[in-house]
Amino acid sequence: MVIRTISSEIPNFEKLALPDVPPMLQALIRSSGALPVMLIVGHLRGVKFFERDGTLVPGIIAGLMFGCEFVLIFTGLVFTSASRASVFLYTAPFFVALGSHQFLGERLSTVQWSGLALSFAGVALAIGVPQPNVDAKVLLGDLMVVAGGALWAATTLVAKGTQLRKAAPEKALGYQVAISIPILGLAAWIAGERIEHVPSALSISLLAYQAVWVVGCTFVIWFAMVKTYSASKLSAFTFITPLFGVVAAYFIMHDTLTPVFGVAALLVIAGLYLVNKPDPKLTPDPNVPA
């Protein structure tokens, strides 16, 4: 679960590289650099990428959602701050919990549903309370990031509820990264993006970090875990991510943090605690013989 938390610094890194590389081109470079990493790792592990195993259709669907997810996220980050994006992106567990209940038959206890509600209240507080540094453009960026979070959740459900769950994680994610490349390329072309000058060493290093480590490694580990663990409970762990993102945005990006937004972030974290609190009805009593 910490794996996806580490990759939460994407909003901050994307913002830092924006002066040199526009958002869609950043996403395109990231996917293009991550794909060979996954192919090499998969080859070394003996993954049969082109074997017919019933994963083609769900893989294409997941890939289309994955590409559109990052079009929304990277575009939204142009309008909103890194700290706000770090919170709104991680509305994904709400959608995963609802989808898991509806489509995968997973169940959460009353306390865990209360935790999701508490975290949702935190997100609603951050969006709904007027703040001096928030205007219509920022709210548009917020909503685009939330939509990206919903697509992330949908991708998780597809990976968990279709033949993709039987595929190696490198193959399951490989579909998504490969299909995202033309989507992101088209989005960059439509937006008229171009690199006007040689990027700085910092921007190049951040792009390499995102391609090799974030997508090429941690996303693969994420999908390996999705195949094994409860999708709703696994996704709920990512609620810890906004705390790291907000703190990093404050110190790295010098984002303005209001007391209201601080309370909202704390509500999200409190919800995480409740979602992952063991259900007493499902926890065996150590004093009772098995």
Image (spheres, helix red, strand yellow):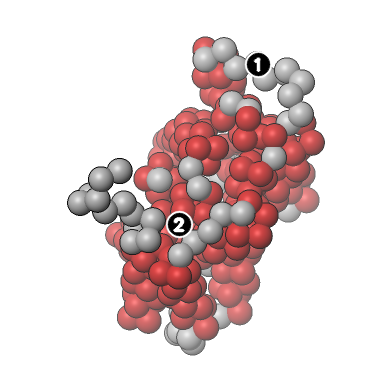
Left or right position of 153 against 163: left
221 or 131, nearer to the observer? 221
Q: Residue at x 46, y 53 (%)?
A: 233
Q: Which mark is residue 236?
A: 2
Residue at the left extreme, as displayed: 287
140 or 278, nearer to the observer? 278
Q: Could you tell which of marks 2 and 1 lies nearer the N-terminus? A: 1
Q: Residue at x 63, y 28 (%)?
A: 167
Q: Residue at x 70, y 34 (%)?
A: 163
Q: Which residue is mark 1?
A: 48
Q: Which amino acid, mark 2? A: Ala
Q: Is residue 247 above or below residue 155?
A: below
Answer yes or no: is residue 218 visible. Answer: yes
Q: Which amino acid, mark 1? A: Lys
Q: At which x and y percent is residue 283?
A: 33, 54
Is label 1 in a helix, a strand or a loop?
loop
Q: At which x and y percent is residue 218?
A: 46, 36
Q: Residue at x 61, y 69 (%)?
A: 143
Left or right position of 80 against 187: left
Q: CA distance from mark 2 to mark 1?
A: 31 Å
